[in-house]
Amino acid sequence: MIRLDGVEKRYPDGTLAVESLDLLVHPGELIALVGPSGCGKSTTLRMVNRLIEPTAGRIEIDGRDVTHVDPVRLRREIGYVIQRVGLFPHLTVAANVATVPQLLGWDRKRTSARVEEMLELVGLPASQYADRYPHELSGGQQQRIGVARGLAADPPVLLMDEPFGAVDPIARDRLQGEFRRIQAELGKTVLFVTHDIDEAVRLADRIAVFSQGGRLEQIADPATVLGAPANDFVADFAGSDRGLRRLAVTPVEAQDLSHPATVLVDDDLATARAAVEGGAEPYAVVLDRAGDLRGWVSARQLGGGAPGDTAGTRARRFDETISVGDSLRKGLSEIVQHDAGWLPVLDGDRYVGVLTPDGVYSALRRTSPSREEPVPL
Ligand SMILES: Nc1ncnc2c1ncn2[C@@H]1O[C@H](COP(=O)(O)OP(=O)(O)OP(=O)(O)O)[C@@H](O)[C@H]1O
Ligand SMILES: [Mg+2]
């Protein structure tokens, strides 16, 4: 846990970078700090590991006042990953990752096992990368080594300052995905600075929106920051397309699904036709006796028929399915990409309904934290 209490930083030239900040990061929580350039994000991070001394207030990690801890020791206990990576150019990848474990006096065997494990974790196997030098890696690979180095000594607390800032969008997307997986596995307590609101939405448990002077305008989970910004400043920062951004943080749930007629694979064509005609949609979902999805049929596909023809023989397979808990964004993206009006949804292996654009809309409405009456379109 990280706790900041009335923390202030006034630089010697008089700049008040952080005025009076209260912030609590729970154990295992990732808080993203976002806000305009110069609002005090990096200053805040660097006060936590005492690269910068606060001029007032108190900072605690797990109940311990950090000003009473030797700063060098403190920094060994806190992972720190920065944008320009800061790898030592004259050291190999392995030696870079081993820096903190070595400072902590780990023996050679434990250190090298750890280096191997970390390189594996960030997807750069030791056999291939351990002996390279930083200049022999791409920018994105260097950043991954930066993350590996930050995690190497298994610090419970991580400070990350635009760690994925200097890479192209595709590499960034991959790094974010990897980091999410790592975080789900390791559950570190993380303060993560970014100016990319989408990155914050994707990675953070809560987002802290700063304005100049380290003023906290809002701190809340991503859905709330996007759906119910506390004021105009936050609304501006979250962007005019924050409504669309909410798609990424809103899961598909059973209650938002539609239920077209279902038929069984071995239903004959007349039975299947009757089911479609009796249903609300001009198609039916085809299931087997176990309830597993086998495809779909439209009324047209059920016409004519030779003896022995069944719903199953006429069924078309689905290109894509999604699962309960996937994001609406994923669902809508599949619907658009496959030019389909709907998409079957599974819960585990079981078919539970279909997602349509109407369902997407109703899910957004249902989960909107704002109490405003919806405007009819
Ligand atoms: N050593 C320093 N001396 C004086 N002022 C400083 C110093 N370091 C930073 N500042 C000022 O403190 C304020 C906060 O800087 P900080 O680096 O924390 O901003 P930031 O939110 O990280 O910005 P960015 O998004 O551009 O990285 C800025 O006005 C900056 O100019
Ligand atoms: Mg900064």
Image (cartoon, rainbow, N blue to C red):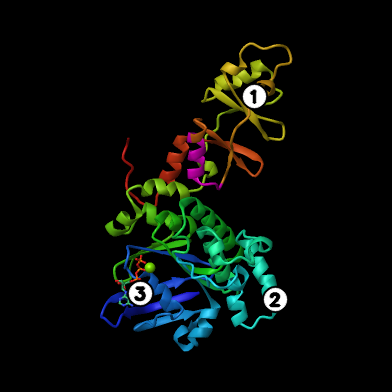
Circle 1 Cα neighbour tier, 10 Å, few/some/many (<14 / 14–19 / ≥20): many
Which tag is nearer the camera, tag 3 or tag 2? 2
How far from the left and from the top, in percent, is residue 60? 46, 80
Q: Is residue 77 above or below residue 272?
A: below
Residue 170, can we see it? yes
Say left or right for 266 vs 299: right
Say left or right for 222 vs 108: left
Does label 3 or label 2 sit earlier along the sequence?
A: 3
Front residue (pair 178, 146): 146
Residue at left offset 58%, top offset 58% = 181
Q: Is residue 368 above or below residue 220?
A: above
Q: Amino acid at mark 3?
A: Leu
Q: Which residue is mark 1?
A: 315
Front residue (pair 351, 40): 40
Indicate which disc residue 110 carries: 2
Q: Which residue is mark 3?
A: 21
Residue at left offset 52%, top offset 63% = 143
Q: Amino acid at mark 2?
A: Arg
Q: Disc 1 on helix, strand or loop? A: loop
Does the closest atom of ligand 1 sit within 8 Å of the Cβ of label 3? no
How far from the left and from the top, in percent, is residue 116? 67, 67
